[in-house]
Amino acid sequence: MHRLYEAAAYATPERCYWNEGAPPPDWPRLTGAQRADVAIIGGGYTGLAAALELAEAGARVTLLEAEAPGWGASGRNGGFCCLGGAKASAGQLRRRFGAEGLAEWRATEIAAIDTVARRLARHGIDAETHSEGETLLAHTPRIARGFEAAARDIEDAYGVTPRLTPAHALRQEGFGGTFHGALTTPLGFALHPRRYHDGLARAAMTAGVRCHARSPVTALRRAAGGWQLTTPEGTVAAPEVLIATNGYSSEDLPDWLRARTLPVQSSIIVTRPLSDEEAARQGWTTRQMAYDSRLLLHYFRRLPDNRFLFGMRGGLTARPRAQAAISKRIRRDFAAMFPEWRGVEITHEWSGLVCLLRGLTPFVGAVPDQPGLFAALGYHGNGVAMASHAGTLAAGLILNRGPDIPAAMRRPPGRFPFGRFRRLALAPAYLTAEALDL
């Protein structure tokens, strides 16, 4: 298994808040030989959503997770079930896929949120949902002045009416901080990532999916009638295979995947529970999930137990020195944006990997020139909804039924320049973004 980052980037996050009170499901290791209609590599939202859809259609499904259930991004993210999944701008999408393709992508964003909401309701998953949509906070007056035009664009694009909050009313609405205006889009909600993941896993296993943890695929090769997957203690033979490993992919499983993803680190801290007095002093009393308008954005929300979650992009490497620097940086940014909480204890801190693709849109489709091999990945930092939906779309593709894959998600991703050194491109990109964010 060959991954891009240092080993520390893939270590189990011991200080992740989502681990508390929600131990991972007990999936057995794969031992011996199995046969399946579909084998899935990756036990996160994408893999579980696909597995559930396939099993409910009558397919025999074996799902293989390299580590513990929820070990990857599905157990580490900020819990924002919202619009997104692509980094390509509306203009880029229009040029590449036409006005129809752009409209199709936007409808897919909404459908992705609905996919999660529907599964939560259908399977009775208590994921501590809250927040009426998502709020964008302007970090400069110039950005705030553009919110009226942005609101009109959102109404045209998504058929909903955003709510504008001027600077003088922010504290009154619970958005106290160093902001200059707010734009709230009433689509999406916040959730507990691990509770959602574990609920999906229970539903999939109830439907008959054989889920195996600590069963990394060490070899994937063509065999009579399809594919053979090898793990340390077993094998799976299946005519069709879905790669659902996203930012935690191995560069050689399959070889086609080499240099087609660019994992980027993201870091999160969580405070101790805040008292009502402390919340009032800062002026942040809302339960809205929010993010700021920087290119290198921060995202944050008040959790149901009154802790505060604050996230931002991570370091360029997982070496100790870089990790120490980003830990210092995230605390500095938190204190600058919420100065009344400068001395509040940080009780949890962890990092995870966001998956970028060169085309800046997700991919769901067949791996070229590899019959029976499929992939679904690349959610660009907004994977709670889009990963769940991508897995559902991938299952429909394998079953030869269901909605068509949107044009923006059909094009196989190209390779990034510089191969295993492609992380080097992040440094100038970050420096440019920081300069533009001033």
Image (cartoon, rainbow, N blue to C red):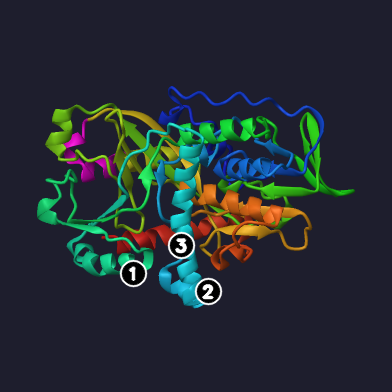
- The CA span between labels 1 and 2 is 18 Å
Residue 219, how many percent across, how many down? 78, 42
Amino acid type of disc 3?
A: Ala
Q: Are marks 2 and 3 in contact (CB under 8 Å)?
A: no
* Relative height, residue 98 to residue 273 (above, below): below
* Front of the two marks 1 and 2: 1
Amino acid type indicated by mark 1: Asp
Looking at the rendered image, the quarter that the C terminus falls into is bottom left
Query: Which residue in the protein does label 3 denote?
Result: 107
User: 131 and 248: which one is in front?
Assistant: 131
- In this rendering, the answer to whether 24 lies above or below 53 is above
* Residue lying at 40% horizontally and 29% vertically, measured from the top left: 17
Q: Earlier in the sequence, mark 2 or mark 3?
A: 2
Give how far apart the Cα atoms at labels 2 and 3 are: 14 Å
Our reading of the magenta stretch's main secondary structure is: helix
**Considering only order in the chain, which callout, 1 or 3, is on the residue closer to the N terminus?**
3
Of all residues, the one furthest to the left in this rendering is 168
Q: In which quadrant is the N terminus drawn?
A: top right
| Residue 332 counted in the magenta span | yes
Question: x%, y% of residue 246?
Answer: 58, 48
Residue 97 is tagged as: 2
Looking at the rendering, the stretch of residues picked out in magenta corresponds to 331-343
Spatial separation of the CA atoms under disc 3 and disc 1:
12 Å
